[in-house]
Amino acid sequence: MSDSPDAHAPDPAIDWHAPPARAVRLHATTNALWFAVIPLLAFAIPLFAADGEQRLRMLAWYVGVTVAAAFAGAYSGARLRHQRWRLDAAGLWLRQGRLWWRETHVPNSRVQHVDLKHGPLERRFGLATLVVHTAAVHLSGITVRGLDEADAEQLRGTLAKQLDDAGDAL
Amino acid sequence: MNDPAIDTAALPQDGLEHRLHPLSWLFVLLAHLWQFIPALVLLLFAGRGDRNDLYGLIAVIVLVVLSLAQYFTYRYRLRSDAIVVRSGWLHRSVREIPYARIHNVNLHQSLLHRLVGVAEVRLESAGGIKPEAQMRVLRLDQAEALEALVRQRGHAAGGDAPQADALEAPPLLAMSNGEVLRLGLISNRGMLVVAAAAGALAQAGDNVFGMLVERWGKAVFGWFTGFAGEHAHDSPVAIGLAVASMVVVALVLVRLLSVLLAFLQYHGFTLREDDARIRVERGLLARYRSSAKRRRIQSWSLHEGVLHRWFKRRSLRVQTASGQRGEGAQRSLKELAPIATPAECDALIRHFLPEAGWDALAWQPLHRHAWWRIAVPGLLLVLVGTAALAWHVGATGLLALALLPLQLWRAHRIADACGHACNDRLVAWRTGWLSKRWSFAEIGKIQAVRLAQSPLDRRLGMASLLLDTAGASAFGAPLYLRQLPADVARDLSARLVAQLARRRV
């Protein structure tokens, strides 16, 4: 992240939190599996209908495409390692991506509600996903993936507490 | 619907539950039937058997029963702080809508409504696709009283005292017939209808267009051969004339249609403000009346297209927080000035945002090389297109490269036209070269901020800043500041973030 603009840090004492390594691994794996499922579904019927040599040729194609899709999925999932978040007096900050770098900020007073989601796999690895909802149209659900469960609970607690003293943001 | 001092006495405020207007089931039925019109038309054309008529009859009976059930089960009660709406028979719901949370009130009267003397009321709060309550229908005086009640009570909860005698203030903007005519000429509403009709005709299957062209050709050729001689329809002049005349007539017809639609929708447009609520009334046959609280406006946009510029007019729109789509979107308050002179638009903005310093904004340019970045997609398109052309027709295809300087010149003009401005109340972004648009919002209305850089941006030292507000269009945010110098974007973002953190809404 050395080449990305190191934005104004209102409070440098607070660190940017990186996702734990297991979260990146889990995300890459699940993404790879999802990507691999698509060719599986797309090829299932033609593969079933084909016969003989044609089926062998299709099988080879199929394996190739599935592996390529899985790699693409793993790569896109592993981009989670560039995610950083922090919470300070101004609100929640989220940085994503390296080549397509973006930094999203939600002021505390603009948080509408907070969702904490645990998928079955995430639960197994002690991880959680936090979705911060705002009234905005394009940045309406800011999703922080691969949070450590304890961090996530704390983050939600802080954001939800600040909700109570903020007024109607519209 | 002009109101000489509405009082809210027309409404039953005894704390008991009340039904809607006794005829409301009829309007509910009509609304249902309206949705079925495409199906009915299809039935009329496709099915010619007797049994289809029977099905149609059954459907209508079912709808009548449903409408009656809705009338008998829909009740509203006016409490001092909220409206309580109870509806449903098997699936019951009670909905409590505090006056202070109602963002928009829309009154709608179709021609039929006007004959009977009733109106449809929609109450909208922030967000949501459907309105909070849709009262179909109330007696007109009751509807107006309800609107006034929401205005008063919403204020009482807000804290500041309502001004009772502000009702008869002169309108902030009233459109004369000349203005409506200009609006029709400028707007392309007619084109939408033509496009929809063309789509419907294409669906119909018959070659309607071919027939149309042939008939027209025959008519024009006939007229032309009348004085140009027998063999005229072979000459390219005749064909050219026929096509050109058809295009001209089509354009004139579309504009006429636009003018007609403008009169239907905008005749008698008035913009008023009372008790910090902005109220718009319009419509020739069907009357629309919508109102929203001034402080509920999320963002503003001022637009000036090429035709606007010819007529020396602009249009001023606002976005409110209610996320109405489709039918509702047309009715809620959107346009403060469908068309007005630039001076009038500026005066309106000054009136509604008196401390924002709209006239004295210091516009900042884009990054020095922004034009280059703007040109990239067009350049790529030209290069790919040229390659394809050269592949097909040989070296002559390379002539398309002449478009490159044109692209660059266009990008230069766009880059010069864009800019951003920010003072301590307002943040603004202007864009467009031929069709100009100024978008702005109060800083307090910004909900979230995103600073972004693509690899190309980074190389050129640029960044983009998305300032998202509620109620923005789903297609492209109005305040998406692109091709800013990276340090300027960062500073602006930091400044806005600091202000947002300080300001407690």
Image (tube, rainbow, N blue to C red):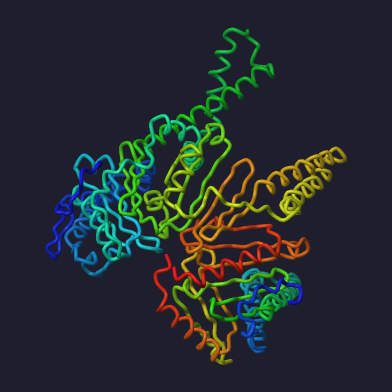
Q: Is residue A154 visible?
A: yes
Count of numbered circles on the image = 0
Q: Is residue B205 something one can see in this rendering? A: no
Is residue B202 shown above or below B33? above
Image quadrant holding the N terminus of chain B, namely: top left
Q: Quadrant of residue A54?
A: bottom right
Instruction: Judge whether B387 appears above or below A46 on screen.
Output: above
In percent of width and height, residue B120 lies at 26, 50
Q: Nearer the viewer, residue A99 or A50?
A: A99
In this rendering, position of residue B214 left or right of residue B55: right
Residue in the foreground of this view, choosing between B131 and A62: B131
Identify the residue shown where x is 32% and y is 45%.
B288
Residue B339 screen position, x and y as percent:
46, 39
Residue A4 horizontal/vertical position (percent): 73, 72
Taking depth in this image into account, of B2 and B163 the one nearest to the observer is: B163
Q: Percent from the top left, x then y, of residue B423?
A: 56, 58
- Foreground residue among B154 and A48: B154
Q: Measuring 25% from the left and 41% from the top, which residue is drawn there?
A: B2
Q: In the picture shown, does residue B301 fall above or below B183? A: below
User: From the image, which quarter does the C terminus of chain B lie in?
Assistant: bottom left
